[in-house]
Image (cartoon, helix red, strand yellow):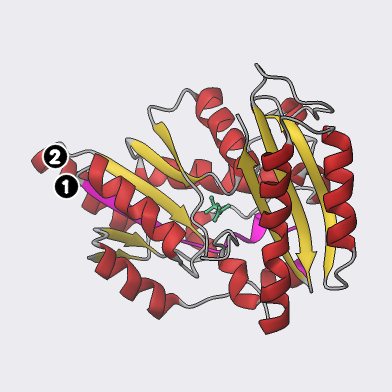
C-alpha cells in the first residue's frame, strides 16, 4: 500500500500507473476514524476497479460547529492498518495546505436548489458547500473512474451527484448500503464518541425509522412519525433535529404513503453532544 501526503506525489504515481497499465481507479473519500462501513466501500471498489485510492482528510470547511470539528475522532495509525488489511492500494493523507493552497474561501458556488436548503443543509449551514469544495478538489487530484460513497449520508449522495452533473465529470457514482451494528445502529465514525449510556440510547434512532417503515403501509404517516418523535423525546439523552418521510428523489416532505412515490425516512439527532444521522429507504 502506497501512502502519499502531497498532491504532486500522488498525481505523479497515478499518472505513471495509468501510462503503464491504463487501469481503472476507484476512489473512497473519508475523514478517517474508519469502520466497517468504510471498509465495505473499499471492498466494493476492489471488485469494480483495478486500483483503489482512499483519502483521509478531516475537511475543516464542512464543519459549521467548531467543537464538532475539534472533537472529530482521529486515529490515523489504526486507519492505515485497517486499509492495509482491506487491500487498499493507495492512501492520500494531505494536510490543509495541500488541499487548499489558496486558502479555504473559494467555494464551488453550485446552486443545489431545494436539496441545498432542506434537512442537513438547513441544520448545518455551509456544510454541503464545504463537502462540494473538498470533493471537487479531491476528484480533480485523483481523477477516479468510480466514486464510492455510503447511503448513510443520503443527502450528501444527492449533493455529490449534482456536483458530478454540474461539471460533467467523467466519474460514475456508486452508492453502497449502510452497514449497521448488530442492534441496528448505523455505523459512523462519530459512534466512537458515544459513552456507554449514549451508545444504548443511540439505537433508538434506527429503531424509530424501522418502526415507521414497518407500519407505513397501513397507518397514518404523520401520526406514526409523531409517535416515534414522542418516544425519542422521552429519552433525556436524545434531542431530535428532524425525523421525516421524504420523496427519495427530491427530498420534499411526504405526509401520506403513496404507492408509486419513492419514499425515504431520515433522522438527525444529538445523542449527548454527538450528532448522528440515519435513513431508511422504504420504496
Ligand atoms: O462523508 C464524509 O466522510 C465526508 O463528507 C467526505 C465525503 C469524505 C468529504 O469530506
Quarter-of-image position of residue 86 = bottom left
Check disc 1 and report the residue beneath it: 16
Residue at image coords 22%, 53%: 13
Residue at image coords 73%, 20%: 258
Q: Nearer the viewer, residue 86 or 223?
A: 223
Per the image, label 2 sits on a secondary structure element best described as helix
Which residue sits furthest front? 218
Residue at image coords 60%, 47%: 153
Q: Quadrant of the N terminus?
A: bottom left
Q: Which residues are magenta?
A: 51-66
Q: Nearer the viewer, residue 263 or 215?
A: 215
Residue 53 on the magenta span: yes
Task: Respond yes or no on whether mark 2 lies under 8 Å from ligand 1.
Answer: no
Query: In the visual, does 75 lie left or right of 159?
Result: left
Q: Residues within 10 Å of mark 1 (few under 14, many from 20)?
A: few
x then y, percent, for residue 139:
43, 42
Query: In the visual, does 21 lie left or right of 29?
Result: left
248 up-or-down from 4: above or below: above
53 up-or-down from 97: above or below: above
Q: Nearer the viewer, residue 164 or 14?
A: 164
Quarter-of-image position of residue 252 = top right
Check disc 2 and report the residue beneath it: 19
How many numbered marks, from 0 up?
2
Per the image, label 1 sits on a secondary structure element best described as helix
Amino acid at each position: 500500500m502506497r501512502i502519499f501526503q502531497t498532491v504532486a506525489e500522488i498525481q505523479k504515481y497515478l499518472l505513471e500507473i495509468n501510462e503503464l497499465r491504463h487501469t481503472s481507479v476507484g476512489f473512497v473519500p473519508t475523514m478517517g476514524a474508519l469502520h466497517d462501513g468504510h471498509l465495505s466501500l473499499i471492498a466494493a471498489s476492489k471488485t469494480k476497479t483495478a486500483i483503489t485510492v482512499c483519502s483521509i482528510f478531516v475537511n475543516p470547511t464542512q464543519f459549521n460547529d467548531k467543537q464538532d470539528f475539534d472533537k472529530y475522532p482521529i486515529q490515523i495509525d489504526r486507519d492505515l492498518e485497517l486499509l492495509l488489511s482491506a487491500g487498499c492500494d493507495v492512501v492520500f493523507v494531505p494536510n490543509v495546505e495541500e488541499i487548499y493552497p489558496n486558502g479555504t474561501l473559494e467555494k464551488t458556488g453550485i446552486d443545489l436548489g431545494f436539496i441545498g436548503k432542506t434537512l442537513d443543509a438547513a441544520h448545518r449551514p455551509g456544510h454541503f458547500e464545504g463537502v462540494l469544495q473538498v470533493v471537487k478538489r479531491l476528484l480533480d487530484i485523483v481523477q477516479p473512474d468510480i466514486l464510492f460513497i455510503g447511503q448513510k449520508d443520503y443527502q450528501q449522495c444527492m449533493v455529490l451527484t449534482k456536483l458530478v452533473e454540474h461539471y460533467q465529470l467523467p466519474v460514475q457514482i456508486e452508492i453502497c448500503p449502510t452497514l449497521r451494528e448488530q442492534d441496528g445502529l448505523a455505523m459512523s465514525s462519530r459512534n466512537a464518541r458515544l459513552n456507554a449510556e449514549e451508545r444504548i440510547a443511540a439505537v433508538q434512532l434506527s429503531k424509530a425509522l424501522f418502526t415507521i417503515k414497518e407500519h407505513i403501509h397501513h397507518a397514518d404517516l404523520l401520526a406514526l412519525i409523531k409517535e416515534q418523535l414522542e418516544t425519542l423525546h422521552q429519552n433525556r439523552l436524545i434531542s431530535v433535529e428532524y425525523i421525516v418521510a421524504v420523496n427519495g428523489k427530491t427530498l420534499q416532505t411526504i405526509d401520506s404513503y403513496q404507492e408509486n412515490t419513492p419514499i425515504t425516512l431520515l433522522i438527525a439527532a444529538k445523542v449527548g453532544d454527538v450528532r448522528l444521522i440515519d435513513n431508511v429507504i422504504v420504496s
